[in-house]
Amino acid sequence: MNNKRNNSISISILDVQDLDKFLDDVNTIKGRLLGKNNIEITIHFDVMDGKFVKNNGVKLEYIKKVKEKGFFADVHLMVENPVDDMYIDKVIEYGADSIIIHYEIANFDKTLEYLRDKINVIKNKKILIGVAIKPNTDVKELINFKDKIDIILVMSVEPGFGGQKYLETTNNKLKEIHKLYPDKYVEVDGGINIDTIKNPIKYNVNGFVIGSYITNTPDISNMYKKISDIINLELN
């Protein structure tokens, strides 16, 4: 798995007001750095139902816009009932490239199987399956599911709201994940900035979900370059 995708900065668009302009700006950044940087830019969707977390997230229809602009759509479902409420069906229809469900939801086992079955009937497209875990969830809980998932998304804050501080206890969890699941694509989500990103890199994290730290900066291009330079420096 790790050998099939580049390391990525997955930009959360939760706080983005003008999505079309933002995507155009990010595409300009991609074009400018093409061939100079091996850090992929993907777009991260924080999808919420107001139940699993007490907030509302990004509209599912935005996935279509993101795909039209040529981006990888990384979809994080922070919802209680991804199957019954049709979230899985809709995000597949809209073109999601990865679908991440939470381990902590009710009927996680059945939801994972439903997701796998839906993807298996799709021809000519590889949709990656991920599982997100909250800060207090033990990484060993995923042992029985490791052959059924591609991505492990580690929440380094409590899910639901942007702008939170990175939990340092995440570092030990990332270290353990690297030992237990060395072939998985590992993402970390919450409180990532130019200071906190260095420890996750040490523990072989592949993807860094970053929201307001990038989207609220006056110079997105410069901030992206700073972060990607740190990733490349730490990896080499």
Image (cartoon, rainbow, N blue to C red):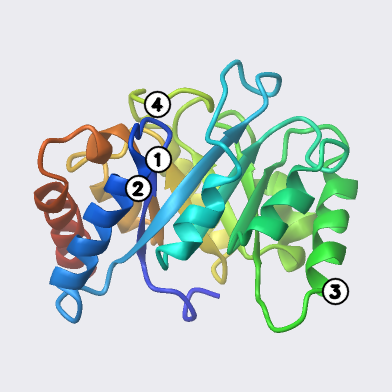
Q: Earlier in the sequence, mark 3 or mark 2?
A: 2
Mark 1–mark 2 Cα distance, whole angstroms, equals: 11 Å
Kindly indicate the quadrant of the structure image that contains residue 82: top right
Please identify, in this view, whether the residue under mark 4 or under mark 1 is nearer the observer: 1
Identify the secondary structure beneath mark 2.
helix
Tell me residue 114's x, y (percent): 87, 55
Residue found at x 16% / y 35% = 217
Q: Is residue 70 left or right of residue 90?
A: left
Q: Is residue 105 left or right of residue 219?
A: right
Tell me residue 224's x, y (percent): 18, 53
Kindly indicate the quadrant of the structure image that contains residue 29: bottom left
Instruction: Decide which of 201, 13 is in the foreground and name it.
Output: 13
Circle 3 sits on which residue? 121
Please identify, in this view, whether the residue under mark 3 or under mark 2 is nearer the observer: 2
Q: Which of marks 4 and 2 is nearer the N terminus?
A: 2
Determine crowd level at label 4: few under 14, some 14-19, many 20+ residues with C-alpha closer than 10 A. Answer: some
Q: Earlier in the sequence, mark 1 or mark 2?
A: 1
Q: In this view, does 187 lie to the left or right of 37?
A: right
Please identify, in this view, whether the residue under mark 4 or under mark 2 is nearer the observer: 2
Tell me residue 40's x, y (percent): 33, 67
Mark 4–mark 1 Cα distance, whole angstroms, equals: 10 Å
Residue found at x 26% / y 74% = 38
Q: Residue 162 carries which label?
A: 4
Relative to 43, is 149 above or below? below
Identify the secondary structure beneath mark 3.
loop
Circle 2 sits on which residue? 20
Amino acid beneath label 2: Asp
Mark 3–mark 1 Cα distance, whole angstroms, equals: 30 Å
Mark 4–mark 2 Cα distance, whole angstroms, equals: 21 Å
